[in-house]
Image (cartoon, coloured by chain):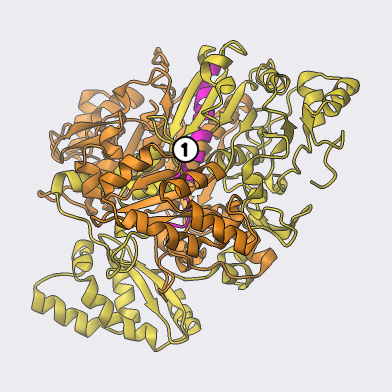
Chain colours: A orange, B yellow
Amino acid sequence: MTPPEPSPSRPLAGLRVVDISTYVAGPSGGMTLAQLGADVIRVDPLGGAPDMRRLAHNARGRSLYWASLNRAKRSIEVDLASDEGRDLVRRLLAAPGDENGILLTNAVGAKWLASDALSAVRPDLIEVFIAGNRDGTPAVDYTVNAEVGLPWITGPAGIEAPVNHVLPAWDFLAGQHAALAILAAERLRARTGKGQSVTIYLSEVALTTVAHMGFIADAAVNRRPRLRDGNFVYGMFGTDFGTADGRRVMIVALTERHWKSLVELSGVEAPVAALEAALGVSFGDETTRWKYRGVLYDLIRPWFESRTLDEVSVALKSARVLWAPYRTFEELVNEPDSLLNRSPLFADLDHPGIGTFPAPRSVLDFAGADDSSRQPAPALGQHTDDVLRELLRLDAATIDDLHARGVVGPSTGGPAREG
Amino acid sequence: MTPPEPSPSRPLAGLRVVDISTYVAGPSGGMTLAQLGADVIRVDPLGGAPDMRRLAHNARGRSLYWASLNRAKRSIEVDLASDEGRDLVRRLLAAPGDENGILLTNAVGAKWLASDALSAVRPDLIEVFIAGNRDGTPAVDYTVNAEVGLPWITGPAGIEAPVNHVLPAWDFLAGQHAALAILAAERLRARTGKGQSVTIYLSEVALTTVAHMGFIADAAVNRRPRLRDGNFVYGMFGTDFGTADGRRVMIVALTERHWKSLVELSGVEAPVAALEAALGVSFGDETTRWKYRGVLYDLIRPWFESRTLDEVSVALKSARVLWAPYRTFEELVNEPDSLLNRSPLFADLDHPGIGTFPAPRSVLDFAGADDSSRQPAPALGQHTDDVLRELLRLDAATIDDLHARGVVGPSTGGPAREG
């Protein structure tokens, strides 16, 4: 079997990952690898895993969420409750070749997938597990997030309750860590011949990331609480302003040059200089700008509040401060100058049975990248027969028999026409 | 030169990355590789890049933020404004060997580091750039976040303004993508002999992630706005409850089993069954639970509000619903049963000149991982001499001369004692 020729746009061509994961973390990690050209085979139980039915749905009840998190993969549907179905999965993992024998899963409770059960399958197997907590208790992004401090400092200063994030950032970070773990383990296997078992705990992804930001050092060393502070960015001058037509704009003055540009733009050089003289400080220093963020905000805001977003945008485009208009999802999709509509990564793509909507190619823009990574999610079981034929060398009669006995799906006995 | 023996706990031992990046995205990506055993050499201009001085500070004005984002790296200090300093960096990148010749940077405006300028350095160079927007305009996490819709659906339902996230999730995701791009490109180089230039745009990291969640599909296909909804999790039953002693608890009923456990725990089987009968629905279905989340929340909350966190915790520990107490950063650091204090990844570590605080080893828990990845950040220029000697084979007299002429730092003429 000749391996596919790696091309710059398909840097992981040849690598094969068996992906038995659900919801966000595992599927997003697998998708990242799939978009880089790996053959990522998502394995679902008959009828699909529960995440196939998650909101948002289209008008026909199909999950837009699932379709968006499983692009560019192949799908096989197997009776994972049966010994025969489990054996098929084990045989996929046992497939010979340097680029086979890689499992990504969050099915940490499944004994048949546990590390000790699989060690006989292929001694150099690479297994990457995504779990909740190290003590064995389950966790999801939103429970983990509650524990790590951020909800108490998110949102307007007056609020007395925690404010959760909406983006499951811990899931996505765990997914990227899982993708990285697979490449790191495969690199090590190529050098040592040894497999690996790596477990990534969602709660530890959150915990370490919060530590990386210095939040834990600050609490441990300085012992003073970090305060909830609206949209002000900690440690510099950055916040949002309203415009005369009811829009909002985020402004960040990261450098002294940005700050001078913002002051000049909003015509407050004189009052800012008077304040500096009277206070004996320089707002050229980011920590000082942050300390006086309230008064500086109030000095600058009339300029924004007396102009429309269009007027503000024209002025900001020739300034040097960092800025962006806030957009709703609807504005992101519909406004011609939105990030989405300016990005060449996205193109309208027909997702069979789901609808037509903008889909991205890989965000990792390898030189010479083409659009081949912009593929829809598969229909459930769309590739069952192909995978059994290619990897396990099963013949048509054997595959038909597996369908007839309900060991694999779809139940029509052939690839799903639509799903 | 014998390469270091890869060990399970140092899976990337031997790989060398020249890291000329600042703030969060690049440094966090480089740190991830360093914690896996790569030799990540952070290159700073004389006196350090601006991120060295960012808040939070300790009492002596040293940045806890920088110290937390640059662990396990080596540091060299070079006059990057001079031709001679730039030439030293180019020579580091030109170092022979399969595992050299890798650049991670966000200095996209620096012409001397641009792809065409470096192509002569080593034809198979791997360059991973982290940039703001594809059109060349700069962007930071907080401006990017404004554009992708999330701030308008974050926070309590009554708020009329966008609510920013506090965690720079786009930065951290960009950093993980950068680490992944390096391993993918290095894998491809090992097969084809060819280098790569990969650019990751922060705004496209945000945009693609929002697309992966189905937000863009939902807006494009269904054309109805996603509503701001407090701490309710979209599409299932999950939200926070207050306790009698003023604490908060996050609860998620992801499965029907979780839901039944929550109903039983809070003693509302009868009213829930009565509602199901009267409405003609089953709350066994997650979409139905989400649709009726308001009334279900109000039915359940008295149970939480009449109990302390301790009482609630005892009951939840024997239930099957997903849950976690909210903690502030201070509670995370100080409460003995917090995630932090239960995690074996963390141990108190003395950071010279910074303080003693809990620091994590790599979140990628390779089998047999030890604590060698739990290292503090270097002092600025701590490894200048070592790196020049090892990689460029410079002798002591030449290195002394570079110090004396201010081409490299620290200016003491030797490694920083403390920084």
Front-lying residue, A71 or A292? A292
Q: Give the quarter of the figure containing the N terminus of chain B.
A: top right
- For numbered disc 1, what is the local secondary structure? helix
Marked residue chain, label 1:
A
Residue pictured at 54% horizontal, 12% vertical = B193
- A89 with respect to A76 (left or right): right
- Magenta segment boundaries in residue numbering: B165-190
Front-lying residue, A7 or B256? A7
Residue position marked by numbered label 1 in the rendering: A179
Front-lying residue, A144 or A161? A161
- B139 with respect to A187 (left or right): left
Residue A253 pos. (x, y %):
49, 48
User: Of helix, strand and loop, which mostly describes the magenta segment?
Assistant: helix
Residue pictured at 47% horizontal, 36% vertical = B177
Is residue B172 within the magenta segment? yes
Q: How many marks?
A: 1
Is residue A237 within the magenta segment? no
Amino acid on which the number 1 mark rests in the picture: Ala
